[in-house]
Image (cartoon, rainbow, N blue to C red):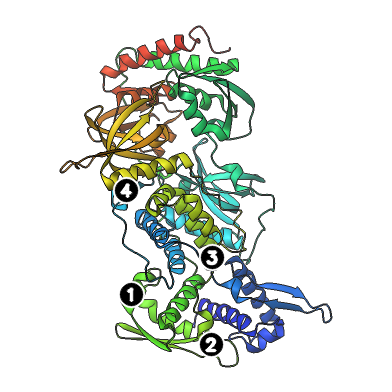
Amino acid sequence: MSHDADKLIRQLSLVAFLMAERRPITARDVKSNVEGYSEMSDEAFARRFYSDRAELLSLGVPLQSQRDEFTGEELYTLRSEQYFLPKLDLEDDELAALQTALYLLEGKFAYAEPLRLALQNLALGRPGFVETPTATAGRVEVLDPDYSPEMPGRLAKLEGAISKQRTVRFEYWSISRDEVSERTLNPYALLPDNGVWYVVGHDLDRDDIRTFRVSRIRGDIRFATRRERDFRIPADFDIERYRGRPPWQIGDPVGEARIEVRGDTAWWVQRAYGSTGRLEDGVFVTEYSSLPQLASWVLRQDGRAVPLEPEELRREVAVALRRVRETHEGPPPQPAREAPVRATDGPAERPAGPVAPERFAVLQALLAFLLAACGEENEAEIPAAELLERFPSIPAEELEEHLSLLNLVNFGGGCYTVYAELRGDVVHVDKELWGDTFRLAPRLTPLEARAIRLALEYVGPMIAADAHTPLERVRNKLEETFGQFELAQTPEPQVARAEEDLVSTLAQGMREHRLVEIEYQKEIDARPSTRLVEPYSLERQLPNWYVHTWDRTAGAERSFRLDRMRSARLTEERFEPREGFQPTRLRGARTARVLYRAEVARWAVERGARRLADGTALRELRVGSDEWLESEILALRGDAVLLEPAELRSRIAARAHALAKELGVERLRARA
């Protein structure tokens, strides 16, 4: 039997023995009675027992220890009421809505398998649990721009290093310096932020806390040592400090800016950036670490944001507008020929499987499922296909091995838990004497809890809409099941209540074919407009939600971004779905060609541009509106030149000239 199998039997048997004894036990009791320890030398036992205890604690198993005041020996206990999931008040539609989340995220969510296992445990013994997605879920699409075939494998390796607190080494492409170098990191946490995955930890080469974008890791992620643990995560580390920062606040703050927001823009700024600044009488006050990035944000607002202070910000905006105007007057430049693809332009790692639940957790859940299938009887038969469907992390060729491992789990003294045997296409289960001890679902592991939190982050408003329950209520119920283990390195799901309410209203309109009146503010408008729409589908393209509609006000197909939707009201009027109408966000879009200067080409290549021989980059963009393209070019501050459509070049040049006057910066020059 493999080393890994021996360890799993030891750990499961240790859990069984501790719960069966219902009294504090010593290490000597463990060595004498628990499968796998008795034949070890005292030195080997001490090493293995310490390692197994640490690993079980990291998996959320609530082992407790205290020192005997008379003998000085360490005493260990495991109370069954702390090991199993507490009774949940999740309604069937709330549980079904969580299953909908798995359906929506399947194939594009690195944590799908731990999420599936968590739902399996939550649903254990719930005959009313619905596994098919709701009708609304069929009209929702989730897109993760940062997802790639390599991403799940990288996240899995980093997850393992974080849970074991192991130092890792990897090659990393520093995009600002355009160089690849080896980095050595104590990883503290994984962070999804604005649709991008980051790993945060102590960079041993720089002796500082650093953030690394996971998609910029090149090659394999390797453990730096052979030790079982290399570091401990500092008690004062707070992952929330590293998330939700706008581009102009990445790094140490160097000053505070004041920006007037015109028209009805203040409500949107409050919703989108309220946590990163404050509004004072129509003025957005925000700290900054990068003036160029803050200038980009000002220019993207296309006149709805006026820089007031500092003067350096006003100059930055003025210089950027002058560059935009100059690069769009006259004929466009001729792009160079395409350059060969460089190693730094993409991952050099073979695609790997998704983040897999820990094998211990899989065996825990499988054992509970087999025993629950017996119910009050002593035996049961389960189709092997059903087991494999419920536990996809168990390969078909390894099902028999997993069953054999469970057959060896014992309570000491020859008392076993279960005997399960694969007979053709059926698994026959015999419940042993104390089998009922494991009939309940085990508490979620930290990895499973993280998977649920991430699902809430990705599609939480959809869960709430399908459950007909405020997301906060579902979340609170689930938080009660996460146990006593530490989740400080897992960010809290950030789902705005406004976003949740909008999704709920639009989903109801989709289900009941009712018109929805929305108040919407386009990026270029100072005031929102009222539209009457037929909602057809929702799209979650991280980090934004979109609704695809037939806009009766405009008499055309339209898509709307929910963070720019001020309100949505369900009307009593119903509509007949248009036959064959399947709206998408960029239907009817045209293609724009954009040339990026060498100084920013690397960032453009990362987003899909092609590198050219002179160091510049060329990208073909699908553009839904000329207004969006105009604000995008303005925000790039002259570092990007629109080549086509040709007729928009003079329009952008004229807009840059007019905007400088509107913002009162036309006479400013860069400091010498």
Query: Relative to 4, is 449 above or below?
Result: above
Helix, strand or loop at mark 1: helix
Q: Amino acid at mark 4?
A: Val
Outermost residue to the front:
572
**Horizontal placement of 367 versus 286: left or right?**
left
Outermost residue to the bottom:
414
Q: Amino acid at mark 2?
A: Trp
Residue 48: image quadrant is: bottom right
Residue labelled with disc 2: 434
- Residue 612 visible, this angle: no
Q: Give the mark nearer the N terminus: 4 vs 3.
A: 4
* Res. 445 mark: 3
Residue 189's spot in the image, x, y percent? 57, 52
- Residue sitting at 78 percent across and 79 percent down? 73
Disc 3 residue crowd, few under 14, some 14–19, many 20+, Cα 10 Å: many
Residue 159's spot in the image, x, y percent? 52, 58
Outermost residue to the right:
70
Helix, strand or loop at mark 3: loop
* Res. 140 mark: 4
Quadrant in the picture for the C terminus:
top right
Disc 4 residue crowd, few under 14, some 14–19, many 20+, Cα 10 Å: some
